[in-house]
Image: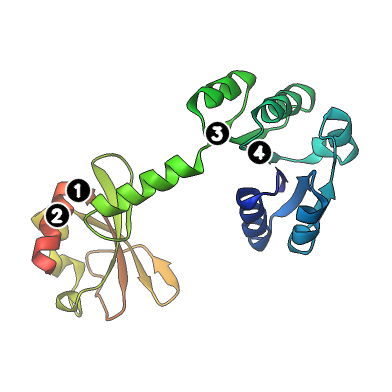
Amino acid sequence: MKLCVIGIGKFGHEVATVLANHNVDVLAIDQDESKIEHIRDKVAHAACIKIIDADSLYRIGIEDIDTVIIALPNHFTQTAMLVRILKSTFETKTVIAYTNDHVQADILNVLGVDQTINPEMEAAAHLADGLSAPFPQTTRLSNDLAVVELAIPKKFIGKSLADLALYENYQIKCIALKRDEDVSLTTSETILQENDIIFIAGFNTNFSELKKVLK
């Protein structure tokens, strides 16, 4: 997979370096030479382009890139232009754009962007989600349904999932078990050990009832 990040500010730098650490072939582009020098050794390719347009993108081989992330939150006009060029001229498969404005996001959607990102809104939602979740490690699947990553409490050690009867008592299903670094599916015969972590799915109200029992 080849991926390009245009705009190496704080957000673009973080996205590009994390992707590179995950062995993704990343091309980082910015108009600021100092930003490119700072990231050059952290990604597969980096290029300082003073004017980012169709010709310059063609010269760096943008047609071979699967996904392009445009991280220019303070430059909406340039972001819109790039979305149009990438989707219309190069038919880029996936274009993702950073914007902090709902109206701008709507315009980018009309231009053909595949996804818009508003990190501030997402961070706020994530914080509120975590504060309202019944357990710290909660992934919400909907407003009501969630998956919880739960470290085994002492009262669960040595018991099987059949003994705990999570579904019968709380309508909660155990879907996986993490032991050391291995993750596996569970059965009713699975015996829980110290330091195990289980992944359980259910409704928020049911998790609240389970939490009362574990106190």
Which of marks 4 and 2 precedes in the sequence?
4
Residue 142 occupies quadrant: top left
Q: CA distance from mark 2 to mark 4?
A: 42 Å
Q: Which residue is painted at 65% across and 63% down in the image?
A: 21
Amino acid on which the number 1 mark rests in the picture: Asn
Q: Which of these two is toward me, 48 or 116? A: 48
Give coordinates of residue 30: x percent, y percent. Answer: 77, 45
Q: Residue at x 18, y 79 (%)?
A: 154
Say what secondary structure mark 2 lies in: helix
The amino acid on which the numbered mark 4 sits, given as a three-letter code, is Leu
- The residues bearing labels 4 and 1 have C-alpha atoms spaced at a distance of 38 Å
Q: Earlier in the sequence, mark 4 or mark 3?
A: 4
CA gap, disc 2 and disc 1 = 6 Å
Name the residue that disc number 2 marks: 208
Front disc: 2 or 3: 3
Q: Nearer the viewer, residue 127 or 65?
A: 127
Could you tell whether 59 is left or right of 86 in the image? right
User: Residue tagged by mark 3?
Assistant: 116
Query: Which residue of the protein is positioned furthest toward the top in this rendering?
Result: 110
Residue visible at 72% across and 25% down in the picture: 81
**Tag shown at residue 72:** 4
Quick one: label 1 or label 3, which is nearer the N terminus?
Answer: 3
- Give, as a three-letter code, the residue at label 2: Ser
Picture coordinates of residue 166, whole percent (x, y): 15, 60
Examine the rendering and report whether any part of residue 60 can be seen: yes
Percent across and percent down for residue 188 are 22, 64
Q: Earlier in the sequence, mark 2 or mark 3?
A: 3
Check if mark 2's residue and mark 1's residue have beta carbons within 8 Å: yes
How packed mark 2 is, by other alpha carbons closer than 10 Å (few <14, some 14-19, many 20 or more), is some
Q: Which residue is mark 1?
A: 204
| Real-space CA distance between mark 1 and mark 3, rounded to the nearest whole angstrom | 29 Å
